[in-house]
Image (cartoon, rainbow, N blue to C red):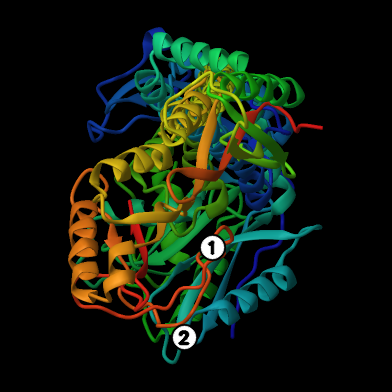
Amino acid sequence: MLSLRNKPAAPAPAPAVADATTAPVGPGSAAPEGPKFPASLTGLSITWLNGRFAAIAVQRGVVTGRWVCPETHDAASDLAALFREAVTRTGHQGTTVQMVIAHPRLNQLWLEVPETGGPAVQRFLQRQAQQAKSFEGPAAFSSQPTITSKANRGLLLHLLPQELIGQIERQAEAAGLILTSLLPVGALVQRHLALLPLDKDELAMLAVELGPQTVLVVGRKNGEICLARTLNEGWTRNAARFAAEVNRTSHFVGQQFGLNPASVWLSGAVSPDLLGELQRDFPLPVRTSPVEASEGWWAEESLRSPVVHPANLVGRERLAEPKRRRMLLVTLAVVALLVMASAAVVVGFHFLRVKEQRSSEKMKQSVAQLSKRFQELTVTQAQLTNYQAFIREAVDGRPPPVPAWFLGHLGDVIGPELLVTNLVVRASGDHWRVELAGRLPEVRKSGDSNRLAAALGGLTNRLARGPFHVRFLTDAAPAPNPVGALNAISLYWIKRGTAPGATTPVTGDFRLDGRFP
Amino acid sequence: MKPVPSTSPFALHPWVLRSLLMVPTISAIVLVWHATSRLDRVQREMAELETQNGRLSRDIESVEREWMTGDIEAVKARHDEVMTRMRGGTELVSLWLQQANERASQLSLEIVPRFEAPMVRTIGSTTVTLVPATLDVRPAAGQDADVRPVYQRLLDLCLQLSTQTNRADLMQLSVQTGSNSVSRATVSFSLWTKEAAQ
């Protein structure tokens, strides 16, 4: 690795403004007839070149104002007031500002790094930047690629104190601006290089004198550079020293890149005598640049440069802050809307719930009343059912005097030859049981059992018809049994087929058992 | 243009900022969810109450349709009438016995009453006492007030005693005859009373 490093130099008094077009002008004297900008371009560009402060504002591609501060301001603490005045004088309407800086503490470092990138290279660059810095405190740096060297990839680091960048950002914020770009002036010299009348692959050295410093860039017309240096010498003050630094740089480029610059171009005030003197010290042809690089030119070129320029010293985090702020505002608005909508929904649901609860309370009362009414009705219904059952049983279910009716009916249907000695009619469950005993006196005398059978058959047949429909039992066993508790007479039972349930004793006695519903 | 304060919320750490934004977002979602669930609970309760109310209304209407007010009053009045007519046990037994004696005397019959232990019977919600009463009936000796056959007089006695206002169910009739007519009969009744007889 080989590095070229500049020692910080004390700020020198700013030279007089050579370009008449960059003379202080107010908003009223803005010069909109400058170089054309894209129609979408809006911004404020400020140059702070070794204390010289200038600004240009563009609104939708049209320059709305230019301003060059007549005094020099070396202290960063003055920037807030200068920013405010620049906004006022240029009529800038936006909130962002881009800045080009040339500062005594700004220096460059050229490094060879491996082709592979990644965090390791970043850590390496960080370490090298902190080691190579020529000022107190941590260094912030940006890097831009250079023409590939013999072996490795080349990177040009622009170093500036972190504290100074933070101070510039805070000053911009204090003026209501957001610093989106802080470009070292060396990064813009390559744009100057592109304007020179060079051949396609011609390597040239361009020196731009900015007050006490000179920015020296070695590169091609297409923007590719090998090196950029900030020299604390200029041809105006010490031409010999300047020539020595240029020659040294030329040798370095030849060693590192294997390339040899074909010409040296000077941008700034150069008298013909001085040009001749310098030509004697250089082995290369020395020419003056046709581009008038005033403060206004740097500011305009800054506006034309992309904000994401690799040499931009404002960190990506800082660049993303406006977008992040917009996103945050949108997010806050969405969250606020969500919260408000949520609150509205909650309040609406609350009132709806209160209304539903009131209805629910009324409904509960109604249900309670209906339940009570239903219970009363159920009790009444059960009571009435019981009453009905009782009435049905006690009044409607009163049984007729069936035994008396049967006794009366028996008197009608019994023949005169039969003598009934015992009659029992009693309730037995859901039917009536009848026991009938008696005798046929004539049969006892004659022993004619057929006569008894005929008489009993007639009786049973008549009883089997209406109204009682008596069914006589036929399975009575022939045994001498008393007829109920009331019958003291012993009877012999003989099963006979003349009538169902009829039994005829040999003695002429009979007994009938039957039932009817 | 206002200067941007250096301590603006945009300077917060992204994770802190995200956390701060998540708090109201999550709170809003939780609140809405909470309010929704509470409302849903109340609405479900309301729906259940409406269902219950409808079911009760239908049941009540059904019962009321089944039991018209007039029907209810009629049944109650009928029950009250029956219960009013139904006498107490002792009173009924005495009255019934008195009437039996009167009827038997008119029919020239002698009766010997016999009462058994009363039985309690519950019909629906009403409890009644059934008193088994048995009459041993014989023709009265030396009395000629009624010249009809004993058989006829016995029938009359049974019919008169079983068709009185107070319910007396004729449960059994046993008749024993001699050579010509009824010599003896046993008639069993079941007397309905409000309470047990002594």
Residue carrying label 2? A116
Q: Are marks 2 and 1 on the same chain?
A: yes
From the viewer's perspective, tell me whether residue A245 is left or right of residue A268: right
Above or below, A379 relative to A291: above
At label 2, which amino acid type do we have?
Thr
Instruction: Work out whether residue A90 can be spotted.
Output: yes
- For the point 54% across and 44% down, the residue is B185
Q: Secondary structure at mark 1?
A: loop
Task: Please report, as a chain letter, where disc 2 is located.
Answer: A
Q: Secondary structure at mark 2?
A: loop
Image x and y of residue A439, in percent: 36, 63
Above or below, A282 relative to A234: below
From the viewer's perspective, tell me whether residue B87 is left or right of residue A201: right
- Numbered mark located on residue A484 in the image: 1
Marks 2 and 1, how far apart in space? 132 Å
Q: Quadrant of the N terminus of chain A?
A: bottom right
Q: Residues within 10 Å of mark 1 (few under 14, many from 20)?
A: some
Which residue is more in the foreground, A75 or A121? Answer: A121
In which quarter of the view is residue B133 placed?
top right
Image x and y of residue A321, in percent: 54, 43
At label 1, which amino acid type do we have?
Gly
